[in-house]
Structures are given as structure tokens and as C-alpha cells.
Image: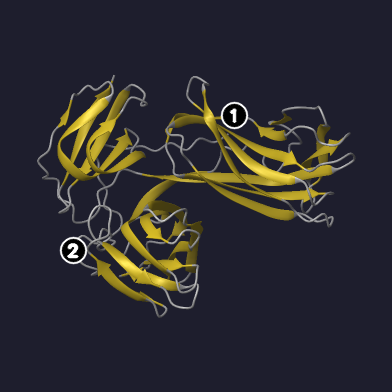
Amino acid sequence: MKKITLFLFSMVAFISNAQLSNGDFTSDASGWSVQNASTISFAGSEGQPAGSLFVEAASSTTSGAKANSFSVTNAGDYIIKFDVKGVDGNKVQAQIWQSGPGTTTGLTYTLSGTEWQQVSTTMKGVLNSTNVSLRIISKTVDADFYIDNVTFEEATTEDAYVSNGDFENGLTDWSQNTTTDSSIGTVTGNGGGTGAALTFSQDQTAVTYFDNAVYDFGKDISTDNIEITFDAKSTNAAVEYQAVFKLLDDEDNNLGSLSSGTTTVAADGGWHSVSFNKPNTIIPFSKIQVRIKIKSGAVTNDVVAIDNVTSNFSYETLSLSDGQRQDLKVEVYPNPVNDVLYISKDIALVELYNVLGQKIKSYSNANSIDTSNLRSGSYIVKLISEDGLSASKRIFKQ
């Protein structure tokens, strides 16, 4: 299995790779314009922490706001993050447009509640030969929403942790967690080759999993979302599929599992593509096990199959947004720290990074952060004031 390693030449090496203008809307809406007949305006009383962009979408699912076009230094994968506030159940989506490839769409995000919430999505294969047009649109017609703290950061993508996902080596690196109701074997895969299948000898009484081998990244990983895609085929349309990501630390302690929603596929004799995206609330982690869960619905003689399992996630490298000057006068203490790290003044945005440059967590309007759940070692604390001044501090967690 291939491991992807990110090298930083300096623990505080800030890289300005993208030139997104005015993503924090501190004082106005400059650098942004309407997208497909929307109306936009600066909202000084709303924001994280102060100021935001108010978007009134039109009767279209491509209506929203777009930033002035900008360039990137390096081609590759990038993460778009933004805060959003709107009506519970409404949907928003981030997109980019470039001459040549055209529009690249991110995941559609459904608002949960009416408070501020963060959206994160990865744009793959961004070119550095043509400018980027970033758009945040409503996927709900005639919807109003606020956006704030829009960033576009270069990312590292991990996508090699599913072993033998196409089953061309049979069931190598795959197993079944229980044989109470079924047994694992192989079937003809999607388009030929081999797939994996569970054949049920009785009605399903317990959940069962296709378990992939545990993958060791050899380092701590922090990511906002994990994506998975696989082909599914079932003789019973009531069978429920679910993706589960089991996360472990470097000593094999189970940190918890992330479970996607569930889906079914038509029992029409054909293969169907299934995709899930799961926000990650467990950070950091060092190892992952991908599991395809057959949650319920199978009965005697059912055959439930999977093939072409792929999964990926991305994380930001440590970077400093354009326009932020490293001259904020602020102190953090105690250092080394055991639990609470105090900040000498209230800070609009505090970001915590590990030494690999991966963002672990961010805090708004903070004068302290809780480090009790962090492992021992060095970290970088990046502090940004309301007026764009910044400072970076190296701390050691005992």
C-alpha cells in the first residue's frame, strides 16, 4: 500500500497559493459579484465574527455569489471552506469554473438548523494555467443565506488506504465480521473481473460488514470529510448499505467510528454506483479501516455484492491568507501546556495545526483553547485579529 507523505521545509512555512479576495467580509462585499440573477449585499450585523455576505438567490439552482477570479501557484487539489447561515433544510454548494475543464462542483450541503455552520469540500485537479472563478450557490430556489470566512487552500489528498478495492486479488485484505447469517465469497464484478458478495443462509438477524484491512498512515491525520464510492448489486431491493470508517490512533486504540447514511439499490440484476460523504468529528487519527455495512433487509438466499471500492479525503497545508501580516502582538501561555492554553487578548480566529501543517481545529472569538485531548508534542497556533493582523506561536503539549 502506498503512503503519501507531506514534507514541510519549515514548521512555520507559510505558503500563499491562492489569491481569493475578501473572504472574511470584515467591512464590505468588495471582490464579490452576483451569480445568475441573485442579489448580494454586505451584512455588517451578521458574521463570524463581524460582517458577512448576504445572498438572495433567484429561481434557479445555480444562483448565488462569485468571487473575483484569481490564480493559484500550484496545480492540484484545493479545499474550499466557508461558514454559512440560512434556513434549516436549504441546500448550498461551492463550485469553481476554469477555462478548459469548465465547472467543478463540490458536495451539496444541507443546512441543519439556523445557526452558523462550516462547509468544507475538495476541488480536485485545479489548474494553475488559468484563473479560478469560485462560486457559492443555492441549490434551493429563491433561498436567502449568509456566507463568511471563505477560504481556498491547497490540499493534500489521501486516496490509497483502501486495499484491493477492485477485488482483482480475490478477497485479499477483505474479511467478514460475522458469519451468523451469511458467508463471504466472490462474484463476477462490474464489467467483468471479481467482486465480493455475502450469501445469506437465513433471514438477516444482525448487521454484517465487508471489512477492509486497517491502513496505517504513519502520522496523525486531520480532515473535515471522508468520501467513499463503490458499486453495489443486490437480489433484494430492501437491503440497506452503509459506509463506516473506523478510526484508530498509532497504538491501535479505537477512537470511534463514522457512519454514513444508508441507501438501497434496485434488485434489477445490475450494478449501481453508491457514494457517501461523512463529516469527520474525530481528530486526529493515525489509522483507518473502511467497512461496508449491510445494515438490514436481507433474507434467505439473498446475494449482496460490492465492487470498485474507493475512498479519499483531503486536508489543508499550513498557509497564510493574502493580506494577513505577521505583526499581531499577542502571547499564549502556559507553554508547555497540559490542558487550557490561554491567549492574552480576545482573538477573532484561532487555528491549531500539527507539525505536518494539517489544521486540527479552529475557534472563533477565543481567549483560550482546550488542549487536554491532544497528544504530547509540538503544535502551531495561528491567531488572526478582526483587522487581519496575525501571529503564529509554537507550543508544546505535555
The picture places residue 119, in percent across and down from the top left corner, at 42, 53
Do the residues under discs 2 and 1 have CB atoms within 8 angstroms? Answer: no
Residue at 78%, 47% in the rendered image: 193
Query: Which residue position holds label 2?
Result: 27
The picture places residue 218, in percent across and down from the top left corner, at 46, 28
Q: Quadrant of the C terminus?
A: top left
Relative to 22, 194 lies left or right: right
Which quadrant of the structure image shows residue 55? bottom left
Q: Using the image as rendered, state which of residue 25 and residue 197 is in the foreground.
A: 25
Relative to 323, 3 lies left or right: right
Marks 2 and 1 sit apart, C-alpha to C-alpha, by 48 Å
Q: Is residue 11 visible?
A: no
Residue at 71%, 39% in the rendered image: 295
The picture places residue 320, in percent across and down from the top left corner, at 25, 48
Local packing at callout 2 (Cα closer than 10 Å; few below 14, some 14-19, many 20+) is some
Local packing at callout 1 (Cα closer than 10 Å; few below 14, some 14-19, many 20+) is many
Q: Earlier in the sequence, mark 2 or mark 1?
A: 2
User: In the rendered picture of this protein, how many numbered marks are placed on residues?
Assistant: 2
Q: Is residue 143 above or below residue 163?
A: below
> In the image, what residue type sits under mark 2?
Ser
Q: Secondary structure at mark 2?
A: loop
Q: Nearer the viewer, mark 2 or mark 1?
A: 2
Query: Which residue position holds label 1?
Result: 214
Q: Is residue 35 above or below residue 182?
A: below
Q: Is residue 74 visible?
A: yes
Seen from this angle, which residue lies furthest bottom?
Answer: 37
Q: Secondary structure at mark 1?
A: loop
Q: Using the image as rendered, state which of residue 398 and residue 259 is in the foreground.
A: 259
The picture places residue 282, in percent across and down from the top left corner, at 46, 34
Which quadrant of the structure image shows residue 224? top left
